[in-house]
Image: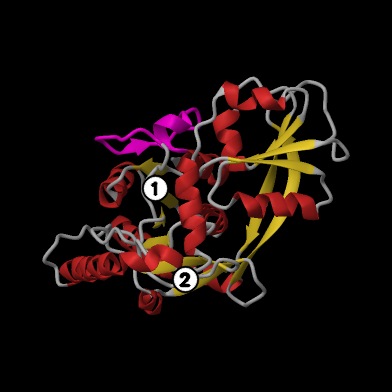
């Protein structure tokens, strides 16, 4: 079923094909999306506004567009500038929760989701998971003094007021056949892009493009004896991400000889998944690595990949939160005086 779903998504990015028969459903879907957004815009549906700025990093397409690495790097850059940052996420791939969950370093991916755990570990900031972004934001506010909240996805969750929207688009796939569900991959009509504050492209060479810098290889299981990555070995490359082909292509561009093994996004790995890799060098993404840390894999490695964000994006988000931080400090100082 998952393999069929992935093929379905892939076909949306090539042509309309036989999907034209679902055109009446697309019309109904667009009417529903536009109506729902209007109900929030005119305050017919309630909206939660956090006491600090909220920045959404989302997309209007189905499938991976590189949101999570951008959220991680943005959180790290803003913290270097002195801001206190928190992150909220849906926690895809985790068990459904009735209450918001604060992610810990020892949280299990099945409990909180692979991406929230990765964000918490790499960005070293508080992360809360829940299907309701507003409830997740409330838990953050109740437990931490924050200057800014970043939302990993959640563009269509209009019950949370936002101060800035960053929409991610994959440079290679773009908007696919430019139709909305179920005819194409769009969650909202293409015109939605005009309402966003920033449009970032994953890949490409434009001014608002995110480029990716491969880092060092790390062993999944740290050992007393330091090992060098066996780049000349026959390698089994494993990926359970939105667009595994991009990961595989990067490995081949690095000169590695790989055999590809792709799984559905947010796949929960089991020990049996690695029986076929016995005696082989296994490489994976960081997102896969957080789910495999407790599995017995003899020679497994993952690579750190750092997104290079345009300075303009970092500065715009910082300028959004910095005045609020300055005002808060001024108020606190005035009260003391």
- Residue 73 locus on image (x, y percent): 57, 55
Q: Main secondary structure of the magenta part?
A: loop
Residue 177 — which label? 2
Does 47 appear above or below 197?
above
In percent of width and height, residue 66 lies at: 54, 57
Q: Position of residue 152 (x, y in %)?
A: 43, 53
> Is 166 on the left-hand or right-hand side of 337?
right
In this rendering, is residue 23 above or below 129? below
| Residue 53 in sight in this render | no
Which disc number belongs to residue 304? Answer: none
Query: What residue do we see at 82% from left, 22% from top?
Result: 225
Residue 99 seen in the figure: yes
Asked whether residue 107 is drawn in magenta, I would say: yes
Q: Nearer the viewer, mark 2 or mark 1?
A: 2
Give me the residue at 75% from left, 26% from top.
299
Q: Which residues are magenta?
A: 94-113
Q: Is residue 128 magenta?
A: no
**Tag of residue 89:** 1
Badge 2 or badge 1: first in the primary sequence: 1
Q: Secondary structure at mark 2?
A: loop
Q: Quadrant of the N terminus?
A: top left
Disc 1 is placed on an element classified as strand
Spot the residue most to the right.
232
Residue closer to the observer: 198 or 11? 11
Front one among 3 and 267 = 3
Residue at 47% from the left image edge and 46% from the top image edge = 4
Q: Is residue 209 left or right of residue 179?
A: right
Q: Residue at x 49, y 39 (%)?
A: 114
Residue lying farthest to the left in this orientation: 44
């Amino acid at each position: 079923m998952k393999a069929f779903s992935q093929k379905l998504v892939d076909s949306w990015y090539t042509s309309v094909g036989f999907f034209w028969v679902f055109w009446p459903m697309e019309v109904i879907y667009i009417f529903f999306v536009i109506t729902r957004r209007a109900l929030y815009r005119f305050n017919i549906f309630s909206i939660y506004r956090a006491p600090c700025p909220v920045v959404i990093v989302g997309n209007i397409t189905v499938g991976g567009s590189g949101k999570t690495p951008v959220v991680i790097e943005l959180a790290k850059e803003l913290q270097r500038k002195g801001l206190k940052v928190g992150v909220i996420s849906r926690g895809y791939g985790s068990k459904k929760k009735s209450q918001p969950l604060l992610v810990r370093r020892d949280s299990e991916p099945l409990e909180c989701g692979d991406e929230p755990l990765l964000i918490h570990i790499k960005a070293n900031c508080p992360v809360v998971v829940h299907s309701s972004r507003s409830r997740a934001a409330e838990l953050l506010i109740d437990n931490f003094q924050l200057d800014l909240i970043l939302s990993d996805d959640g563009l269509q969750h209009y019950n949370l007021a936002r101060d800035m929207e960053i929409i991610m688009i994959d440079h290679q796939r773009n908007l696919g056949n430019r139709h909305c569900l179920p005819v194409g991959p769009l969650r909202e009509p293409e015109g939605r892009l005009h309402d966003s504050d920033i449009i970032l492209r994953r890949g490409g060479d434009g001014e608002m493009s995110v480029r990716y810098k491969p880092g060092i290889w790390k062993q999944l299981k740290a050992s007393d004896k330091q090992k060098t990555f066996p780049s000349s070995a026959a390698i089994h490359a494993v990926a359970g991400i939105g667009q595994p082909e991009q990961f595989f292509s990067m490995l081949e561009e690095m000169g590695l000889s790989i055999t590809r093994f792709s799984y559905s996004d947010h796949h929960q790995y089991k020990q049996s998944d690695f029986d076929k890799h016995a005696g082989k060098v296994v490489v994976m993404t960081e997102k896969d690595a957080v789910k495999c840390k407790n599995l017995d894999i003899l020679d497994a490695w993952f690579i750190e990949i750092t997104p290079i964000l345009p300075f303009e994006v970092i500065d715009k988000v910082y300028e959004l939160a910095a005045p609020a931080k300055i005002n808060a400090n001024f108020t606190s100082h005035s009260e003391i005086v």
